[in-house]
Image: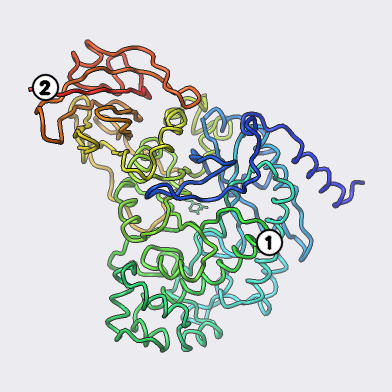
């Protein structure tokens, strides 16, 4: 029988020695994956170079069986995914207190490496979607040691209380053990980032009302938080400064004395307590191995009748982003989970309401992701994009839903193939105001992009309108695979990225068929003409021209056709413009 320590040693030796194909041909740099600013963007640096995560998140239970995952890895590669988000479960990692089983972690790292994929591990520790279904049995069955949230009716919820110091410390020990282990076995940096917990917050009430929580709520607001509020007025969320100022801009007092008597105060209180707990867990992990760490947010735009508790109260929502920033300094990113059809509106809202927060989209709808991707990359410098339940898209995992579908045929795979080619260019221009992204849709069939010396108009080839989709339900994390809507009339939404590569020179690509016309944006000759359009690809980051497009393929040099008229969807085009009068 192989003992636990011998099997650990074997796994460690294998993981340290195994070839990692393309990802290590340049040699793994000693630098741990980390975040770095470039202009206004934040990039993830892996092995010394910026890395764009074209990612996918597996379904919640997929990571619990290496056999289940075995046939899936190569299909993810065929989908042009370069990073897989998969869970590590506290209940399986530490089934007995203090005894750790890293079999699933090692198996995932090994399989990812064999397939030249990177990993982001999701730590399903104390909380997942607000509740505590993933702590091990020794935690769940000891309510005295590991207290629960109580709601306003005195009912205990299956949710660990943030006020439970023993819970926080037990979770931190397990997470630290995980990070220590990853550091030991993953010298080639297959694991590039960590998610700490999952969509935390109290559901069903605006705050925890257990005895310890009530006592803390009646106690003073920590000085650290008050100092931050008083000294960062310029970057406070408007709702936070309004609440503080309306209550008299006090510098000491209880939560209600400082922020007023309102559900929002309960949310602020919970945010502070979740941030303190999750930040403690993250810091314990970073002390072992400081990978970048993020939390994901169950997003809810403020709307009447949908207060904190209808969405997880105290989660890293934009309205309490400041609280998270000061309460959890070990957390680098608060990432929005975005499932609504109008994703551009949600991204704009998130960015405007939680400033000074790099954009990583840890969860989104896998179908709509095929076009929203280009908006997130082009318009907002997203460092990564991760549609959820990615394994469910794949035949034969779900033959009923996708009979005969080949991974590479999926719309998301096609978009990832395009974005993967563009990645070196995207990374070069992130944070420099040289890129734009739009989604052309029934609601906005023609969109203008001002970039460099020109205004580009991106439109459907013909202005066919289609019925508007049902309105988004703010706050609800929609099912990952919603029932298919009735077949819409007219073209589906198309995502387009435009990159300004020099004066009058653009790379343009997208997820479907659009036409792009050009007009000058600066003084001088008033008409823009097309000098040349090349179709091509990027090979190892260098432009490799294919056909020279003119004639019908450009409507006699009048516009760029991104798809249609003999031009395949996914075409990448380099357009050079000139001006005349
Ligand atoms: C958001 C959660 O973070 C995911 O783990 C998953 O439960 C999805 N919701 C399902 O829509």
Instruction: Count the labels in the image.
Output: 2
Would you call the spot at circle 1 few (<14 residues within 10 Å), some (14-19), or many (20 or more)? Answer: many
Q: Which mark is residue 176?
A: 1
Tell me the element at label 1. helix
Would you call the spot at circle 2 few (<14 residues within 10 Å), some (14-19), or many (20 or more)? Answer: few
Name the residue nearer the viewer: 189 or 101.
189
Residue position marked by numbered label 2 in the rendering: 580
Write down the quadrant of residue 418 in the picture: top left
Picture residue at 11% right of the left edge, 22% below the top: 580
Residue 539: x and y in percent read 48, 22
Tell me the element at label 2. strand
Residue 161: x and y in percent read 57, 74
Q: Quadrant of the C terminus?
A: top left
Compared to residue 396, the image places residue 141 above or below, namely below
Residue 405 seen in render = no
Picture residue at 65% right of the left edge, 66% below the top: 171
Compared to residue 462, the image places residue 17 above or below, namely below
Residue 201: x and y in percent read 48, 67
Farthest right residue in view: 1
Q: Which mark is residue 419?
A: none
């Amino acid at each position: 029988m192989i003992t636990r320590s011998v099997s650990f040693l074997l796994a460690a030796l294998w993981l340290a020695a195994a070839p990692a194909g393309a990802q290590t041909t340049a040699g793994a740099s000693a630098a741990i994956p980390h975040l770095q600013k470039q202009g206004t963007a934040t990039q993830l640096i892996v092995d010394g170079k910026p890395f764009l995560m074209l990612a996918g998140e597996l379904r919640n239970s997929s990571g619990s069986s290496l056999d289940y995952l075995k046939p899936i890895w190569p299909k993810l590669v065929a989908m042009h995914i370069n990073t897989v988000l998969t869970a590590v479960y506290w209940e399986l990692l530490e089934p007995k207190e203090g005894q750790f089983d890293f079999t699933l972690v090692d198996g995932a790292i090994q399989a990812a490496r064999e397939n030249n994929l990177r990993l982001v591990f999701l730590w399903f520790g104390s909380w997942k979607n607000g509740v505590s279904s993933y702590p091990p049995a020794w935690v769940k069955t000891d309510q005295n040691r590991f207290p629960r949230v109580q709601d306003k009716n005195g009912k205990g919820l299956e949710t660990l209380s943030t006020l439970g110091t023993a819970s926080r410390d037990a979770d931190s020990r397990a997470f630290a053990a995980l990070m220590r282990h990853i550091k030991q076995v993953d010298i080639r940096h297959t694991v590039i980032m960590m998610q700490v917990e999952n969509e935390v917050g109290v559901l069903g009430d605006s705050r925890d009302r257990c005895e310890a929580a009530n006592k803390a709520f009646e106690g003073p607001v920590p000085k650290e938080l008050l100092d931050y509020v008083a000294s960062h007025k310029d970057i406070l969320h408007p709702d936070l400064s309004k609440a503080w100022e309306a209550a008299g801009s006090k510098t000491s007092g209880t939560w209600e004395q400082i922020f007023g008597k309102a559900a929002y105060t309960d949310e602020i209180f919970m945010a502070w307590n979740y941030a303190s707990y999750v930040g403690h867990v993250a810091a314990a992990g970073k002390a072992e191995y400081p990978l970048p760490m993020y939390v994901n947010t169950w997003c809810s735009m403020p709307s009447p009748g949908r207060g904190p508790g209808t969405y997880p109260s105290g989660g890293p929502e934009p309205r309490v982003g400041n609280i998270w920033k000061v309460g959890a300094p070990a957390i680098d990113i608060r990432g929005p989970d975005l499932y609504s059809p109008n994703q551009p509106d949600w991204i704009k809202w998130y960015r405007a309401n939680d400033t000074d927060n790099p954009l990583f989209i840890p969860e989104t709808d896998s179908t709509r992701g095929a076009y929203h991707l280009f908006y997130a990359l082009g318009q907002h410098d997203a460092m990564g994009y991760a549609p959820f339940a990615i394994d469910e898209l794949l035949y034969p995992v779900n033959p009923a839903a996708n009979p005969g579908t080949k991974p590479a045929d999926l719309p998301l795979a096609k978009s990832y193939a395009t974005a993967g080619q563009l990645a070196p260019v995207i990374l070069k221009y992130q944070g420099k105001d040289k890129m734009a992204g739009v989604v052309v849709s029934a609601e906005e069939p023609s969109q203008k992009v001002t970039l460099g010396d020109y205004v580009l108009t991106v439109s459907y080839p013909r202005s066919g309108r289609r019925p508007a989709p049902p309105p988004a339900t703010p706050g609800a994390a929609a099912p990952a695979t919603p029932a298919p809507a009735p077949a819409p009339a007219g073209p589906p939404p198309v995502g387009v990225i435009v990159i300004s590569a020099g004066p009058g020179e653009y790379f343009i690509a997208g997820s479907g068929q659009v036409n792009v016309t050009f007009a000058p944006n600066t003084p001088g000759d008033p008409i823009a003409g097309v000098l040349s359009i090349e179709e091509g690809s990027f090979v190892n980051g260098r432009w490799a021209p294919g056909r020279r497009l003119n004639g019908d393929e450009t409507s006699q040099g009048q516009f760029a056709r991104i798809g249609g008229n003999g031009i395949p969807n996914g075409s990448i085009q380099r357009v050079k413009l000139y001006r005349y009068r």
